[in-house]
Amino acid sequence: MNENHDAFDEYVLKFDMNERMIAYKYNHSYRVVHQAEEICRSLELDTYERDIASLIALLHDIARFRQWKDFKTFNDSESFDHGDEGVKILFDEGEINNYQVDKKEYDVVKKAIKNHNKFKLDTKNMNEREKMHSMIIRDADKIDIIYSFSTNRLLELEENDEEISEKVKEEFFNHSDVLKTDIKNKNDKIIMLIGLIFDLNYDYSKERILNEKYLNNMYDNLKNKKRFKPYIDEAIKYLKGEK
């Protein structure tokens, strides 16, 4: 819906687009829209559901702009939970009124945005549509995060000389998301990033990352290839469905 894109652009232009990370989040939002739409196509969802998924994707990081302006960080632990803050901006402050969406869909949009960045998706208070749209945005977001770190043009991988923490290593090889509280150094953070694949919900998402060679490209950009090779190899095996 072009009207929704216009409303989003109007909101973002209140911020300084000359700041690299503001521009990055703006472009990230539109790339996530594209990935959400592709996931919907792979699921053979109708146009109505694709429009809902597209709106959620467009707005999922709306709080990031305020976060960078006020705190100069995208670290939620140093500022605010950007999923929760996004819901506040949209529904408490009324920003959602600028978008073309039926009010009966507010709960779907609200729950998907609130949950897109949580460690695990809590589905116990969700119906099937709410769960589906939450899963779509989580996958679409992760696809673009991994893509963004696969090319130094967007986001650089930062390494250091420290060993990968044992707890992080254990979580990764158990095919579990790495807890942020277990990250002790920059190399742990790279493993957490690679481990995002273990929380993907849809075949399209795995195939996209595999076929576009995002992990291979990420590996090419790493300096200490010997340290990270077992993790990249394990991730690719997982995406291929190999034991």
Image (tube, rainbow, N blue to C red):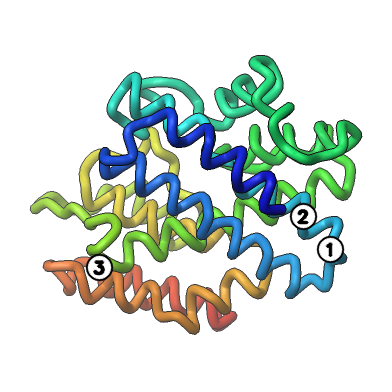
Choose top left, top right, bottom left or bottom right for residue 157. bottom left
- Spot occupied by residue 122 in the image (x, y as percentages of width and height): 71, 38
Q: Secondary structure at mark 1?
A: helix
Whether tag 1 and tag 2 are in contact, CB under 8 A, the answer is yes
At x 53%, y 36%, the residue is 10
* Residue 198 placement, left or right of 222: right
Q: Is residue 207 left or right of residue 18?
A: right
User: Are the residues flagged by discs 3 and 2 in contact, CB closer than 8 Å?
Assistant: no
Q: Horizontal placement of 78 versus 87: left or right?
A: left
Residue 152, visible in the rendered structure: yes
Which of the 4 image quarters holds residue 216? bottom left
Residue placed under numbered mark 2 in the picture: 51
> Residue at horizontal 21%, vertical 47%?
186
Which residue lies most toward the left here? 161
Image coords of residue 56 (percent x, y) = 68, 45
Q: Nearer the viewer, residue 203 or 227?
A: 203
